[in-house]
Image (cartoon, helix red, strand yellow):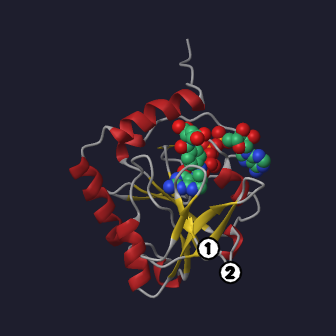
Amino acid sequence: MPQSVPSKQQLRRDLRARRRALPAIQARAAAQALPALLRTLPDWPHLQHVAGYLAADAELDPAPLLVDLHSAGKQIYLPIIQPDSSLLFAPWTPGEALQENRYGIGEPARRDTLRGAAELDALLLPLVGWTREGRRLGMGGGFYDRSLACAATVLKIGLGYSVQEVSLLPADPWDIGLDYIATGEALLDCRV
Ligand SMILES: Nc1nc2c(c(=O)[nH]1)N(C=O)[C@@H](CNc1ccc(C(=O)N[C@@H](CCC(=O)O)C(=O)O)cc1)CN2
Ligand SMILES: Nc1ncnc2c1ncn2[C@@H]1O[C@H](COP(=O)(O)OP(=O)(O)OP(=O)(O)O)[C@@H](O)[C@H]1O
């Protein structure tokens, strides 16, 4: 009998629990490995506008990576949830003022020059689950899928622990694939 694929909802529950159970020392090591891993990207020198996120719910923390990008002279951005449930991205520098969104996640208070995903060079996506082929499972709001529907050119880099890898994910027509996945141990090229 073919093995059935668990629902996205079931997977989300299991993988979020797995993420929360990771020892703090491993979580920190993965976050601290990200800057050197991302610097091996062939496109790294050309990335000028890069959106990240502020870690919530035990997500792989891009903070050291955002500091590294900033110190390399790149402009970093954070997502702002829009009324139509898409995301726009506001420039942000580590330490600048934040205000909480409906999930308690900080968003830049200064939002004068918002960009769409298509106007960024790279986007760091928080992963709940991932496959080697670059499929992703997010928190379930569809925010990233909606925002990427018209942004084919932006380099999509998922950040997720290796314990969040699964062999199969349910495929929906709106799912947008990743170009790379950084696990904290390796940078995987999903386009090959
Ligand atoms: N760090 C981070 N920022 C992000 C995202 C993300 O996944 N991670 N998003 C990526 O989309 C957007 C926010 N999406 C989110 C979707 C669901 C939940 C969440 O915690 N849901 C709760 C129920 C919360 C409630 O309804 O009050 C849950 O499922 O337990 C959080 C963020 C924009 N910013
Ligand atoms: N391009 C889109 N346009 C309209 N609705 C969309 C689009 N993409 C996704 N959605 C809606 O978003 C909901 C959640 O999608 P899904 O379960 O794939 O979320 P996710 O990819 O895990 O979340 P996220 O993208 O926020 O990380 C779906 O019910 C779907 O209807």
Q: Which mark is residue 113?
A: 2
Q: Which mark is residue 55?
A: none
Residue positioned 29% across, 52% down in the render: 27
In the rendered structure, the answer to whether residue 144 lies left or right of residue 74 reads right
Q: Residue 165 at x, y = what percent?
A: 43, 41
Residue 35 falls in image quadrant: bottom left
> Considering the image in quadrants, where does the N terminus appear?
top right
Which residue ends up furthest to the top in the rendered image? 1
Q: Amino acid at mark 2?
A: Thr
At mark 2, the secondary structure is loop
Q: Amino acid at mark 1?
A: Ala
Q: Residue 150 at x, y = what percent?
A: 77, 62
Examine the rendering and report whether any part of residue 173 can be seen: no
Asked whether mark 2 and ligand 1 are closer than 8 Å, the reply comes as no
**Residue topped by disc 1:** 90
The answer to whether 125 is drawn above or below residue 8 in the figure is: below
Of the pair 132 and 164, the residue shown nearer to us: 164
Q: Residue 98 at x, y = what percent?
A: 52, 68
Residue positioned 56% across, 25% down in the render: 5
Residue positioned 71% across, 70% down in the render: 116
Give neighbour class at mark 1: few <14, some 14-19, many 20+ (Cα, 10 Å). many
At mark 1, the secondary structure is strand
Examine the rendering and report whether any part of residue 131 can be seen: yes
The span from disc 2 to disc 1 (Cα, nearest Å) is: 6 Å
Of the pair 158 and 57, the residue shown nearer to us: 57
Residue positioned 53% across, 19% down in the render: 3
Ligand number 2: quarter of image: top right
Residue 155 falls in image quadrant: bottom right
The answer to whether 109 is drawn above or below residue 145 in the figure is: below
Of the pair 111 and 59, the residue shown nearer to us: 111
In the rendered structure, the answer to whether residue 58 lies left or right of residue 150 reads left
Is there CB contact under 8 Å for labels 2 and 1? yes
